[in-house]
Amino acid sequence: MTEKIAYYPGCTAKSYAKYMDLTAREVMKKFDIELVELTRWTCCGTFFGLAEDNLTSQLAPMRNMIRTREDGFTDLTTTCSMCYNTLKRANILIQNDEEKASRLNAFMYEEEDYEGDVRVWHLLELLLEKVDIAGIAKKIVNPLKGLKVAPYYGCTLLRPKEVTIDKNPEKPTILSDLIFALGAEAVETPYMTECCGSYLTVKDKHLVADRTNRIIGSAARREADLLVVSCPLCQFNLDRRQKEARELNSALPEIPVVYFTQLMALALGVDVKELGFHEHYVDPTPVLRKRKLLGTPMKVPVKVKK
Amino acid sequence: MVNDPYPDYMRESIKIVEKTREKRLKVTMDHCSPDEIDDVLNNYHPDFIKAQKASLRFGVSKGEVVPLEVAKIIETKSVLDPKKVDLNKIDFVVDLLIIGGGGAGANAALWAIKNGVKAENILIATKLRMGDSNTTMAQGGIQAAVREVDSPAIHYLDAIGGGHYENDPPLTRRLVRDAPLLLQWYEKLGMMFDKFDDGTMDAIHGGGTSRKRMHFAKDFTGAEIMKTLRDEVFNKEIPIIEFSPAVELIKDDKGQVAGAVLLNLDSKEYITVKAKATVVTTGGFGRLHIQGFPTSNHYGATFDGCVMGYRAGAPLKLMKSVQYHPTGAAFPEQIVGLLVTEKVRGKGAQVLNKNGEQFCFPLETRDVEASLIIRECGGRNNGLVTPSGQPGLWLDSPLIDQIHGEGTIAKNFAAMVRQFERFGVNMIEDPILIYPTLHYQNGGLAIDENTATAVKNLYAAGEVCGGTHGSNRLMGNSLLEISVFGRAAGITTAKSIPKVSLGKLTLDHITKYNALCDEHKVKNPPSPILFPDYSRQEHKDRIIPTNFLV
Amino acid sequence: MDKTTTEVTYEKVKIIVANTEFEVPSNLTIMKAFEYLGWRLDRGVGCRGGFCGACSTIYRLKGDHKLYTGLACATKVEDGMIVAQIPISPANKKLYDIESLKAVPNTMLEFYPEIARCISCNTCTKACPMDIEVMDYVQAALRGDIALAATLSFDCIMCGLCATRCPAEITQFNVGVLARRLYGRYIQPEYKQMTKRVKEIEKGKYDAELEKLMKTDKKGLAKLYAERVREKA
């Protein structure tokens, strides 16, 4: 029977990262898990210009947990690392700080009280727990043979340690495990847990370009075909900022940056109309063709926006 | 039931209504025959009570039969003393002055711009805020013969028959012919009409329609139109002067209209506007409470435009005829008079007497349906009377969900459900009590199909005009009217403005009109009244007059 | 509706306006209570039917710390109610040409970047007299879900109470109107039959028929009118 789990897409999943969202839903279906989008949801709470005091900034994540309960769920998952991080940290605060929790509940008097009883999962974590690596490997129909994939974790999946989805946040292996399960080769780099520059991309794109240059450069030196990420902001920075990074380092090769859900969809042969590669700055299709990984059952539009 | 809003005797009657519901579900009453229609109108329609009418004794439409309340504010002096106005000092000089910030005014401004008038050369003067109007309140829909099975000719016939053949043919033609053009423009502006997945707009019947051509945006059709038009007026940066109603038109020595005198409601000072074209879009007269009826109208619907126009020499027509909407709320008391849109009957709710019986076809034209309801209450004594003395009949709203499925009322009539809910009545479960409410001014300023009045440079559009609907307007033809004729006014004035040359400004017509009033020894308070007065006599008696203007 | 203020048969309650206590019948709305007191209104009054948003009112109730919001025309007086009106909510509406816009996720943020300041406090929703999920539509706009923002905000009467209460200083009602226009213009499909009908009208297809009807006398019209077949409901 299909298991249902509450799903929090996150704002970018409705726009910039819509292919992360679409592929996540399809991938999970392969494992008989249905991602049920919350009936009502708000921003996870990470993107506030106003909320300087830390209690106010907990309203949004807490409200999403309340919505999860309203929809009759006890577990909530999301694909976006940043959303995961924000939701999870708020949940931990509510679980551990009774006084703050009661102040938050008092402020939100129009909602049911919430005491931290929703379990927040990152989708990767959920996959490993509910399906496990062997279960994933079993469903692969289109093994990504010969593809060299550099895992990139960034910060928010791993830090602070209370929220980490990997037992060893200093040297995580979850993504590499997944990459192996998909039949590809993992190319780990020393930069895989470094910050991408995050929201500074708005204020100072050259700072982010510098980070991108190091992260992409490091993967290139190890001859990676592409980078795999779990966060729309990391994806944006590492993909789009390659243009500015090349101004710093003209020798920097183009390396595509894809979501783990896109890669999984490719390997699982899920029936999706498109994987969204045409929306990437660096188009992943040439390298995938080179490795003979494209063809049926996927149709990949050739239109590339640059 | 805890806190039942209905008193016991009304609850008893509701129980009878519930008992007969199942049986009534598939039974629709027949239309009235033409003879029955004549009979019920003559005996029960308020328009046919002679004692409630007067003939105008002077002015350009001398002899025109009007309701007493209208005579009282037409046959009187102006609130403005012409001697006090300095016409040598003009506050605003514009090409186009639009008096009234409702749907017709907004359309006139936007279409004038589309036809070459510069936004900065327009001024919209409005009594309250931009958009405060009956347009905003129109819930039901807008007619337009768009569907394959329909045509402007069929629409014409529906409108002219419904209007008892008293319509002005060129006006009705323009109304029906331009209807799809306006609806398409609204679609392009981004109004959210109810549509099917393929883009086809949903359309239903209204009273007196032979084709389903009422298009709607839930039960917020007028609000959706007005919100969008206002947004567009703001986008075009059209100058607006709010809380500044016009009190009289200005003319020139050639007898042309040349602008208006406005009243600043805060400082109470007058403001002079000189304009090459003046469009009156002030709406109707619901707030005159003709024959003591409650009204569905906006607070500002006080006949100002007709009063000003009449003094400036523009004739009135069809003033004998008033539209009473068959279904105004009769209970609870806080919302008496508020419109219960015809769409409720369109979707299947039946009108019932206190015994839970149908007594007529629920979608006769408005005048006939209203008369039938008045007859059932007063004439046949089959109505209920609320604790505050308001008669009423049941409108069996729960039938709608029974016919179309649960949730239909909540989805289609959100505004109304909320309206009743605020005062404890649940129209999804219980029927609601209704009685005719004063709804629309059928008569008004006479215009041609390009919105020109008989006075040069004076134009009018919307409810302020008479003739388009004859002596009875069909549902959905008033949102259409403000659209079609608002647009027409914009196009016409854009053409006329370059040819206008104004002479010396004057308010002599007011002086002369005031003299006529003296001649006829009128004792009515001055007009336009601008707002209805709901204060009680005990307060009026104690007022200390200050040097504030009125 | 409110032809005259009701004769006093209802028990009286006290309301407080500007630190002054007034006795009014308990069955009145706030607006009618003002008129009962002899006040002639020209601010904070409009359609009197809950459609125009002119009579935004804030009030507190006896022994209750909460600040309530409502429409004066649709809120009944209560004993001990302290009332003030906010007839207009100042706002900087952004100007745009609807024809040159695109219904893409970023459009909302581009015009109203302050929506990103929303902290999901839900004060706007609590303030809305139309029971709209205001926070939800602002959040939908933030993530570029124009369709959801449009449908959720549809009943908005633009009274501005949400905006006056918002700690992030968003003018929600303007965000809503932009979302609805984008939705109506670009997301709802075009009504093709209407485009066809407009072309027919512009080509004069119905002119002759209308001309003929205009020349038909009353008797002839009455015959045609009586012979009409009403399309089934």
Image: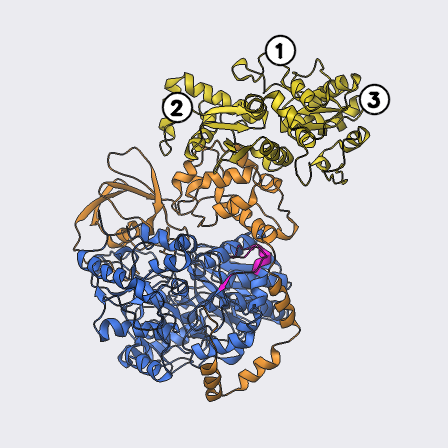
Task: Give how far apart the Cα atoms at labels 3 and 2 are.
Answer: 53 Å
Residue with the mark numbered 1: A170
Q: Residues within 10 Å of mark 3 (few under 14, many from 20)?
A: few
| Residue A195 x/y as whole percent | 65, 18
**Considering depth in this image, is C25 or B204 the residue closer to the camera?**
B204
Is label 2 in contact with label 1 (beta carbons under 8 Å)?
no
What chain does mark 3 sit on? A
Q: Residues within 10 Å of mark 1 (few under 14, many from 20)?
A: few
Task: Give how far apart the Cα atoms at labels 1 and 3 are.
Answer: 30 Å
Question: Helix or strand or loop: what does disc 1 sit on?
Answer: loop
Image position of A172 with respect to C49: above or below: above
Residue with the mark numbered 2: A115
Bounds of the magenta segment:
B186-203
Indicate the chain coloured orange by its letter.
C
User: Magenta segment, principal secondary structure?
Assistant: loop
The colour chain A appears in is yellow
